[in-house]
Image (cartoon, coloured by chain):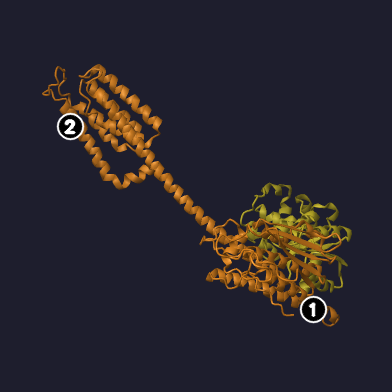
Chain colours: A yellow, B orange
Amino acid sequence: MIRVLLADDQALVRAGLRVVAGSAPDIQIVGEAADGAAAVDLARSLRAEVVLMDIRMPGTDGLEATRQIAADPELSGVRVIILTTFEQDEYVFEALRAGASGFLVKDTEPEDLVSAIRVVARGDALLSPSVTRTLISSIAGRGPAQPVDASVLSVLTDREREVLARVAAGMSNDEIAATLYMSPLTAKTHVNRMMAKLGARDRAQLVVIAYETGLVRPGLS
Amino acid sequence: MGINHRIRLPRRWRGAAGVALVLVLAVAGGHAEANPVHRYGGLHLAGHPPLAAYLLLGVPALALIWRNSRPVGVLGLAVAGAAGWAALGQIDGAALVPVIVALYWVALTRPWRIAVAAGLAGAAAIFVTEGLAGPFGWFGGPNATMWPELLAAGAVGGYVAARRQWLAAESDRAARAEQAREDETRRRIDAERMRIARELHDVVAHSMAMINIQATAAGMQLAADPAGAGESIQAIRAASKSGLRELRAILEVLRQADGGSPAVPVPDLRAITALAEAASAAGTPTTLEPAGPPAPVPPPVALAAYRIVQESLTNVVRHAGRVAATVGLRHEGGYLYVDVVNDGGAAPAAFSDGTGAGLAGMRERAAVLGGTLDAGPRPGGGFAVHARLPVAAAAPARGPQAPATGPAGTGASMTGTAAGPGGAAAREPAADSQDPGAAGRPGGPCAQPVEGRP
């Protein structure tokens, strides 16, 4: 069972999501939070694995809550999916940078919502790769507000950089393994080691870093 | 210097003519002054100098071609020429012409300190040479007349330079002011556009997203849980209704922005009655205290009060569900007090710190009128919003909008005649509501008086 927490300030949205996401046999809605602070608390106390997080909430908003969850070592296993009204929401990029694993628009089809929760809980692929890449490249392509020094990548081996470029292209571990002639387990090891070295908690942060350091450029690949 | 450059080009030919004139004056004048036929009583004139000596006069005059790029060098050359001419025992009155013109250009194009220093140095060199070798001795002839001449040249050059600088600064300032005005207009338009976008996002997109989720849920529940599906459909109905209402209000504002004439009246305090009815119909029994409408207040205050009540009741409906709410309106001591209180226990605690967009918006509305707004959970459960809006200070700058006159209940002219002053004042109390470019649109969409149909 995947333990899912719902965080949205609209009770009716939570009720709807509970019905939609809770319909899957392998997903259990363990709690609901009406604001970011409650989401952080409940993620801890209910041992949630995935949080469906609205961005705009009163008090602690979804961005801040994502940041707090990402900063808490105790919550390192918690994955955050940002729920947004529109895909090109300017806060989504901030949320990805803050540590969210991906984002979904609120009108996602039920089966897509369920499979997104599964993908994020497994952690071996990027959630909605094409949309994520388009978003990140369009925003990172504008030139980062604070340029990220490419030297942060110097901690990576050449092989890891090859893997990183493919993660940024939206490939899953299996796909990376196939293109680089390595075993899926090796690909996974590379990805995990990179996340540890770069302080990323999820593939989404690896994609952000890849774009912001210029390893991958918008419009290529 | 850019200024001189700009002036020199179209006057090229005049400049050339001027140089030629100086050349003729210097050479011909020097030649005439050197004529031994002239008898300056008791002077010992040297007679005509050799032909090559005329270069001392001609070269500096021609060098004036470079008066803009190297005025100090040209002045130095002219001084050298005049001093050389004097050293030959000649009268250097005409030889001073290039010096005077060159000094004018130094004063025109260089800082005044340089002009003064160069002028003094040049004058001293000529003075000494002429005093030693010239026919007039130390204090006669050009040695006496050159001082006012040089002073005038320097002063005129300095004056013209100062004037040009002032004109340039003036036109620069005007251009900057123009730019600032344009920026301000653009900023206002952007702010207005952003506000509409935010309003659309907050209200309409929120409603639509919720409707979508609830509809999905209803579809999934239909077979297994018809009661749950029914609840979802009720929620859809309420959300779509309020979304439509808000959308209509926003569209009205946009239409106004085109046509200029207000398509809807600014909501007044009486419209709050309709708000309470609508909330009651949506499942939040809402009472109004006192039951009758209070004394009329200026449109900006009425609009703010309306918006605060609307936002508060929307929050109650959204977050607290089916609980009773009370709306209080008191007009007392120059203030309009607006209280919206609900006794439901389900209001989220985090509402209290007021960073929610709705609360922030309400605070903003109160603040622009010079009022205050407090919101937070109540000790016994539920949530309360208290606003205090100054009535007098918020009166619009123009127009005969009713001040607080008349007994409660008449509501004679509570409805603003124009959205302009109300809107401008709602955003910036001090804003000049007559500013045509400011497009004084209402600070919030002027919602239609809410339909009170059950």
Asked whether, in this view, residue B76 is left or right of residue B134, the answer is: right
Q: Name the spot of residue B121 as percent of width and height, x first.
A: 34, 24
Residue positioned 16% across, 20% down in the render: B45
**Is any atom of residue A22 visible in this view?**
yes
Helix, strand or loop status at disc 1 = helix
Q: In the image, A184: left or right of B363?
A: right
- Disc 2 crowd rating (10 Å Cα; few below 14, some 14-19, many 20+) is some
Q: Which residue is mark 1?
A: B218
| Quarter location, residue B30 | top left
Instruction: From the top left corner, tell me how far across and down residue A58 is, in percent.
Output: 76, 60
Give a yes or no on whether discs 1 and 2 share a subunit.
Answer: yes
- Residue B190, picture quadrant: bottom right
Q: Amino acid at mark 1?
A: Ala
Answer with the quarter of the image where residue B311 lies: bottom right
First along the sequence among labels 1 and 2: 2
Outermost residue toward the left? B37
